[in-house]
Image: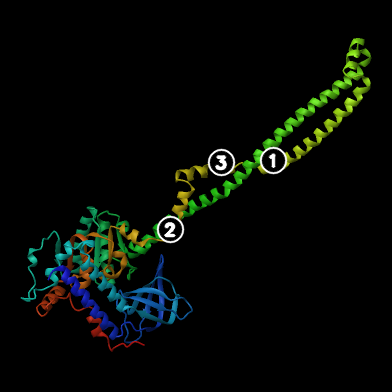
Amino acid sequence: MNLLELLSYYADHLQDDRERSMTQGLDAPIEIPQARRLHTIGSLHLYAVQMPEGRHLIPDVPITILPSNDCEPTEGVVLGQYNGEILIQTLDTFGETVHHFTIVPDTSGFLETASARLRDMASKPESFSLGPAERLVPWLAPSEATGVVHDRNSIAASVLTTHWSDDEAERLTRLGAILVEHARLNKRVLLISPDHESLDHLAGSIAKALRNAALPYKSLLTRYELPMLQATHGIDLHEIGFEAHMNQFYAKANSHKVALRKKYDRFRELTPILAYKRDKLKDLNEVKLLEWRLLTSLSEWQEKVKSLDKTVADYEAIPIWKRLAMQAAGKNVETLSEYRIIYEQKIQDIMKEVEIAQQRIRELVPEATIPKDMRPEYDELKEDITKLGGTKKIREMLAAGEGTNRQAFIQNKRIVVTTANRVLTDPIFKRVRFDVAIIDNAPRIPAPCLLGASGLIRERIILSGNSQDLEAWQMSETTQTLGKWPQEWLAHYLKTTPQPIHSA
């Protein structure tokens, strides 16, 4: 059996388990007596739920929460059991301490999503990195003819490496050393474990190894889900949380965007003001020019009146020949007074126009005056906006980052820590590729999830785990036509359910 046939087999296998989950009532609503909010990081909230007797929630299965306190329904995912309570991660808060609400699991949808991912890998192998995943076939599929596994010794150690040890501390130390080596080579690494509690221990151990190697573990390493443990191996797990990283990044980015928006809004506010001031200054200059022309004309007419007054005063001393010349021009003493009346009327008319112009100038001066600090502020804003590409470019920049892009953010992370179930069913991982996969407690991970995670790996897969778990799996291989790692999907949950759960 080759890899594509194996993927198709497990896709069918998951569909069968989906039907079984519905007949067993794993999607039936569960009445929860009480839940309390533990903490909030970014947009995610962690709740501890008290389960009723005989009911359980399967880890990594999505759920819908129907609060009884008039809050809107919200979505979430089950992380697992810790200290006798079930921890769930929700997208919205629905209270600090909540009594008597309903949780609706979506186990069938979870299995359907997993099956669709495997079918997608089988039908479109060119869209995935199936080279290293093929090396897992000898570990997962015994020969149908002989009932024994294929030759695993023929697998190149550079592609598939195994490390089995009963000493968990020694095993984690070894994995930490391997990861430090790949981190220094700038490889993208996917760290996988079967459950969230063991994943927290793995993440803490890896973070400690990176810190001891003087590598920036807080920026290199990210725990995709909210951690169940507060701290382990001397590491505060919230410091390496994906949601915490993303919240800090976007908070900083949004602070820059807020400052940019303030600049843009202020620029847009000042632009019409200064345009108005500019128009009023133009009007003011035109009125001042008119005033200057009127005053110039007024001076000319006043000079004429002054000349007439001087002529009348000096008339007796004017020679006879000049009197004759004035009379010939119609400017004798009798007509000079008439000219003076005309000139004074002209001066009065000009004075009225000057007063009107001066009144208009007094009105325009405050309208055209630019406050002392406004022009430098506007010039500075204009220079900044010009450097950023203009107002159109800034509008595009402000509109582009309105929402957080989890896909783009996780693609920039070098080391991602999550469970195999989440890799198989969360759409965010479908388009993310990694160079190396380090899979701890591998014998406890179901084969479909192991294959789904391996399809994202380009170079190398490292399997690790307890040798006793490996022996138990190897013993089960001899009795199975097709090996499952370590058993049928959901068999553990279905067999351990105290009684069948029927849908309401």
**Front disc: 2 or 1:** 1
- Give the residue pinned by disc 1: 365
Q: Is residue 497 left or right of residue 95?
A: left
Q: Secondary structure at mark 3?
A: helix
Find numbered disc 2 in the image and state the secondary structure of the residue it sits on. Answer: helix
Q: Mark 3 sits on what residue?
A: 376
Q: Position of residue 116 (x, y in %)?
A: 26, 72
Image height check: is 123 above or below 389? below
| Labelled disc at residue 324 | none
Q: Residue furthest left?
A: 146
Q: CA distance from mark 1 to mark 3?
A: 20 Å
Say few, some or many: other residues with alpha carbon within 10 Å of mark 3 (under 14 / 14 to 19 / 20 or more). Answer: few
Residue type marked 3: Pro
Left or right: 136 in relation to 363 = left
| Residue type, label 2 | Ala
Disc 2: which residue: 251
Residue 233 in sight in this render:
no
